[in-house]
Image: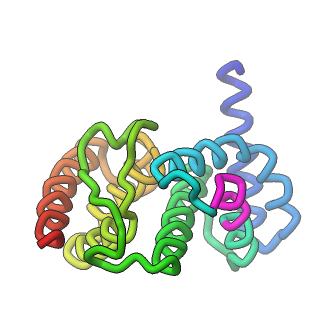
Amino acid sequence: MTRPAVQSKTHDVTQLLHAWGQGEAAALEQIIPIVYHELRRMARRYMAGERQGHTLQTTALLHEVYLKLIDSQKVNWQNRVHFFALCAQLMRRILVDFARSRGYQKRGGGAQKITLVEDLLGPRERGRDLVALDDALKALAELDPRKSRVVELRFFGGLSEEEIAEVLKISTDTVLRDWKMAKLWLAREMRHSET
């Protein structure tokens, strides 16, 4: 795809998001085909870290996000990056709710431990204990909401530093500092929760 086509597609999504935010329900139906492959990639990324035989599949996760989006009322969409950031947050919540409903408890319940390391950014092995990570992220959000959002957008959403900076309206350097500090804090928090 050429650069002008990408810019045109981005512009189209942004316009459709604004229309949808203004209450034009049909705009969502036009957005989904344009962003479907990116949303599917995000959902696959989430599901890659789940245990074998997980009853929630990539397509089901995507459908759950779609249902939640339909229920959204007049969101003031900034742009397509904001849209993907919200979708990443929805995917995280859906998977955490699913894990909690399956009986995982804060300190055990058959959940596997997670190590928050740089390698987790890629599509390789990801943390399996979303409940423990979610609890740690909630604790971090109470202390520093922005650092918690940086982790959520980077670790779960797969957004780049530049995209995170755009969503949060901060500099890329601030994103990098927040990511580094949040990783250290979460690693310590999760070590303490194991005991």
Quarter residue 168 falls in: bottom left
User: Residue 33 at what x, y percent from top left?
Assistant: 81, 47
Please report the bounds of the magenta region as a residue range. 56-64
**Does the magenta-highlighted stretch encompass residue 164?**
no
Quadrant containing the C terminus is bottom left
**Residue at coordinates 69% horizontally, 19% vertically from top-left?**
2
62 or 113, which is in the foreground?
A: 113
Type of colouring: rainbow
Horizontally, residue 167 falls left or right of residue 12, namely left
Residue drawn at x 68%, y 73% as measured from the top left: 68
Left or right, 157 with respect to 70, comes to: left
Residue 63: within the magenta? yes
Q: Quick check: 7 above or below 132?
A: above
> Which residue is farthest top?
2
Residue in front for this viewpoint, 82 or 37: 37
Residue at image position (75%, 72%) is 70
Q: Where is residue 84 in the image (x, y as percent from the top left)?
A: 57, 53
* Quadrant holding the N terminus: top right
Look at the picture and state if 76 lies above or below 105.
above
Task: Give x and y (percent) for residue 112.
Answer: 32, 60
Predominant secondary structure, magenta span:
helix
Depth check: give the residue in front, 97 or 39: 97
In the image, residue 48 above or below residue 195: above
Q: How many marks?
A: 0
Where residue 37 sits: x, y (%)? 70, 41
* Residue at the image point whose x is 54% and y is 73% from the top: 98
